[in-house]
């Protein structure tokens, strides 16, 4: 296996902007120069007199560093360029922006907490958990205010789920807009969340079973982001969570408390959760009438969309990467469905004419990312790589033109189309759309 990394792993922000502006020659030079320092062992495998094999390095002879007795562990210095990144010019201010997860550099299905994507409407806060409160009110027998200590005494559950912003891949409705999988699909992450089931809290307050049909969740940030959840879903698998991947939530992801709404678009995963209200009708809040609505071809806006439909993407090889020579490659990617488990992923290397079934790696969990792999021997010629996921309901991930026929080209949200990566003869991989 040769180069597997995307340019953002090596380039700084300014350089990425140049890549996005289409300066492919620059990309290749910068990419190869950076790669030469990182992949020296790969080059060494082909040269018999390699000093990296012949000379015993210092780290095999001398005493290493002492234990990291105090402090939070950090990745290797050689991995420091694998970062969340903002797409230049996407929003006017950083407090209302997005940072994308570097999917091209992740393995398995878990997103490390420091690489989880971020989407804020009015900036993030590091809220003192001792001061934080959750209020339960509305159609309940007894309105309650919980401290974090109160919540963490309740029966806890831990579950693995993906979170995907409804706007993920939103820039690609009309045409190819961004070069790499970090920007096409990086508003996607997957964690093990720990918290209390919303059903437990609703029972605890004695919600009105006859009239209580909806729950409103509201955040404690300046945007007062609020979203309606139908009672049926609230009682099913929604959680009020305080932990991700074994530690307390990160501030930018809602510390100390967030809603986890499995399968539902990210905006409903209210961060810095401060209020839950039981009601008999949907609230029609600004975040469900003005924002996060689907623009249909006839100009109508579709409201209250919620589930993230089945989707997949090849993360390696993907846009911005370069295959240095022909031969064997492991094609790998992620698949997910807001309706349950992924049943099958097919991969094509000829733009969708022929398909092969990929291997799904365990675990395959409902409403969770699933990792797939498939063997591929590149003959050095042009190729178009695609993946197509099918979930347990039988839903098949659509082609971009099938989606456009129903949704038009001016939408933002819920683009779950099949992604195409073109491999050119020279090995450069680029983002293309195949109709
Ligand atoms: N909750 C509050 N209170 N404020 C916000 O701005 N952003 C929402 C949602 N919850 C938001 C929020 C959106 S649009 C998304 S996609 C997810 O949080 C992103 O969660 P993350 O930042 O943990 O990835």
Image (spheres, grey):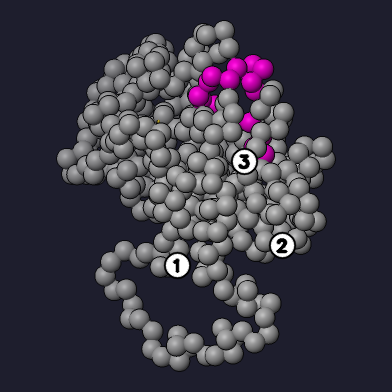
Q: Position of residue 325 (x, y in %)?
A: 72, 62
| Relative to 276, 418 lies left or right | right
User: CA gap, disc 2 to disc 3?
Assistant: 20 Å
Comparing labels 2 and 1, the label whose residue is closer to the camera: 2
Q: Residue at x 52, y 8 (%)?
A: 299
User: Mark 1 packing: few (<14 Cα in 10 Å), some, or many (20+)?
Assistant: few
Instruction: Identify the disc placed on residue 107.
Output: none
Q: Residue at x 57, y 7 (%)?
A: 298
Q: Secondary structure at mark 2?
A: loop
Q: Secondary structure at mark 3?
A: strand
User: CA gap, disc 2 to disc 1?
Assistant: 24 Å
Most common secondary structure along the magenta stretch: loop
Magenta stretch, residue numbers = 403-420
Which residue is denoted by mark 3 in the rendering? Answer: 431
Looking at the image, do the residues carrying marks 2 and 3 touch, with CB atoms under 8 Å apart?
no
Looking at the image, tell me whether mark 2 or mark 3 is earlier in sequence order. Answer: 2
Looking at the image, tell me whether mark 2 or mark 1 is earlier in sequence order. Answer: 1
The quarter of the image holding the C terminus is top right
Which residue is denoted by mark 2 in the rendering? Answer: 325
Of 432 and 158, nearer the camera is 432
User: Mark 2 packing: few (<14 Cα in 10 Å), some, or many (20+)?
Assistant: some
Of 72 and 279, nearer the camera is 72
């Amino acid at each position: 296996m040769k180069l597997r990394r995307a340019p953002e792993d090596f380039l700084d922000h300014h350089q990425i902007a140049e890549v996005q502006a289409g300066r492919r020659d620059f990309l290749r030079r910068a990419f190869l120069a950076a790669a030469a320092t990182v992949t020296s062992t790969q080059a060494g495998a082909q040269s018999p007199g390699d000093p990296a094999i012949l000379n015993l390095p210092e780290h095999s002879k001398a005493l290493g560093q002492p234990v990291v007795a105090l402090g939070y562990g950090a990745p290797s210095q050689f991995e420091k360029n694998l970062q969340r990144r903002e797409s230049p010019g996407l929003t006017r201010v950083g407090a209302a922006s997005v940072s994308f997860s570097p999917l091209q550099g992740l393995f398995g299905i878990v997103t490390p907490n420091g690489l989880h994507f971020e989407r804020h409407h009015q900036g993030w806060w590091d809220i003192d958990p001792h001061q934080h409160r959750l209020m339960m009110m509305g159609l309940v027998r007894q309105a309650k205010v919980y401290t974090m200590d109160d919540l963490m005494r309740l029966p806890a559950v831990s579950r693995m789920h993906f979170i995907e912003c409804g706007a993920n891949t939103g820039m690609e409705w009309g045409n190819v807009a961004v070069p790499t999988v970090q920007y096409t699909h990086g508003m996607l992450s997957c964690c093990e969340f720990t918290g209390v089931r919303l059903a437990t809290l609703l029972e605890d307050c004695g919600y009105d079973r006859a009239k209580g049909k909806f729950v409103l969740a509201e955040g404690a940030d300046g945007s007062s982001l609020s979203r309606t959840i139908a009672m049926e879903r609230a009682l099913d698998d929604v959680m009020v969570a305080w932990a991700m991947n074994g530690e307390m939530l990160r501030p930018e992801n809602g510390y100390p408390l967030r809603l986890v709404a499995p399968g539902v678009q990210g905006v409903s995963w209210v961060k810095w959760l401060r209020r839950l209200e039981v009601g008999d009708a949907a609230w029609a809040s600004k975040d469900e009438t003005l924002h996060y609505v689907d623009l249909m071809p006839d100009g109508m806006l579709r409201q209250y969309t919620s589930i993230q439909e089945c989707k997949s993407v090849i993360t390696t090889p993907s846009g911005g990467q370069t295959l240095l020579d022909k031969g064997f490659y492991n094609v790998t990617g992620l698949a997910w469905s807001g309706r349950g488990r992924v049943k099958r992923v097919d991969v094509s290397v000829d733009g969708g004419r022929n398909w092969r079934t990929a291997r799904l790696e365990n675990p395959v969990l409902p409403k969770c990312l699933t990792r797939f792999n498939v063997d591929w021997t590149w003959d050095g010629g042009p190729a178009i790589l695609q993946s197509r996921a099918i979930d347990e309901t039988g839903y098949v991930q659509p082609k971009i033109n099938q989606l456009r026929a129903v949704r038009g080209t001016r939408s933002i949200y819920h683009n779950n189309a099949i992604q195409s990566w073109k491999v050119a003869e020279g090995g450069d991989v680029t983002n293309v759309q195949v109709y």
